[in-house]
């Protein structure tokens, strides 16, 4: 074989290798995009569920307390406090839902998607910080609503205290996990940038 033939052969193999590399990159990008988009759709579904369930759960759970004999200034104050906290949570979850609904990894640039994820992280940070206040305030509002219905014995006080501590810690943990999900999603999208260039 002469040098020219080897050079032509080498060029053909090099072109094939380049095209295979492009195909591999494209397939990997599609796989990564598909996984991330499914994750985003799941988060969007969960946010929509939160938007629907947040204002419904308290009235349904507390409907036995809505009796004429229970209504006094403590009950009304408890309702107002609970309403304000639930409204705040509703607005934050609704914001998160609309941001998630806008993200389309297939159509958007990586930078645009990252900007939206940063907004989601900001909401997650706000919710994580506010859970230290919102949950005890909501619990206090619910306690005020049920003030006339509770029989405060040692057993009731212990059960309510255990319930408060357990659900408080559970809410803090859940908000931390939510924040971690958005941080991981941000890293995943940054990883996608490598395959789009």
Image: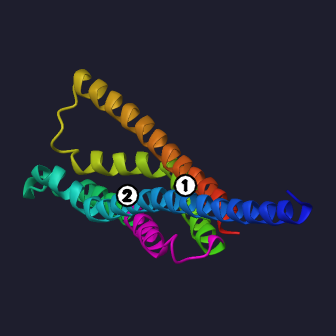
Q: Quadrant of the C terminus?
A: bottom right
Q: Main secondary structure of the magenta part?
A: helix
For disc 1, the marked residue is 182
Which quadrant of the view contains residue 192?
bottom right
For disc 2, the marked residue is 42
Which residue occupies 28% across, 45% down? 143
Membership of 96 in magenta stretch: yes
The numbered mark at residue 138 is none
Across and down, in percent, residue 151 comes to 17, 33
Across and down, in percent, residue 169 comes to 44, 35
Side of 92 relative to 24 (left or right): left
User: Element under label 2?
Assistant: helix
Indicate which label's residue lies in the foreground, 2 or 1: 2
Q: CA distance from mark 2 to mark 1?
A: 12 Å
Q: Which residues are magenta?
A: 88-110
**Of all residues shown, which one is farthest toward the front?**
1
Residue 171 visible in the picture: yes
**88 and 51: which one is in front?**
51
Across and down, in percent, residue 173 comes to 47, 39
Earlier along the polypeptide chain: callout 2 or callout 1? Answer: 2
């Amino acid at each position: 074989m002469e040098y020219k033939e080897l050079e032509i052969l080498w060029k053909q193999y090099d072109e094939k290798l380049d095209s295979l590399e492009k195909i591999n990159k494209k397939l990997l990008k599609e796989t990564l995009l598909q996984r991330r988009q499914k994750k985003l759709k799941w988060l969007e579904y969960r946010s929509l569920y939160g938007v629907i369930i947040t204002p419904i759960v308290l009235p349904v759970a507390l409907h036995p307390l809505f009796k004429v004999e229970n209504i006094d200034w403590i009950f009304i104050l408890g309702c107002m406090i609970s309403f304000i906290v639930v409204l705040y949570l509703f607005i934050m979850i609704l914001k998160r839902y609309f941001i998630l609904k806008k993200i389309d990894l297939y159509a958007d640039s990586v930078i645009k998607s990252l900007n939206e994820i940063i907004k989601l992280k900001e909401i997650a940070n706000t919710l994580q910080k506010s859970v230290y206040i919102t949950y005890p305030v909501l619990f206090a509002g619910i306690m005020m609503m049920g003030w006339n219905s509770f029989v405060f014995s040692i057993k009731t006080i212990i059960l309510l205290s255990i319930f408060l501590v357990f659900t408080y810690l559970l809410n803090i943990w859940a908000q931390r996990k939510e924040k971690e999900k958005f941080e991981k999603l941000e890293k995943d999208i940054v990883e996608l940038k490598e395959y789009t260039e």
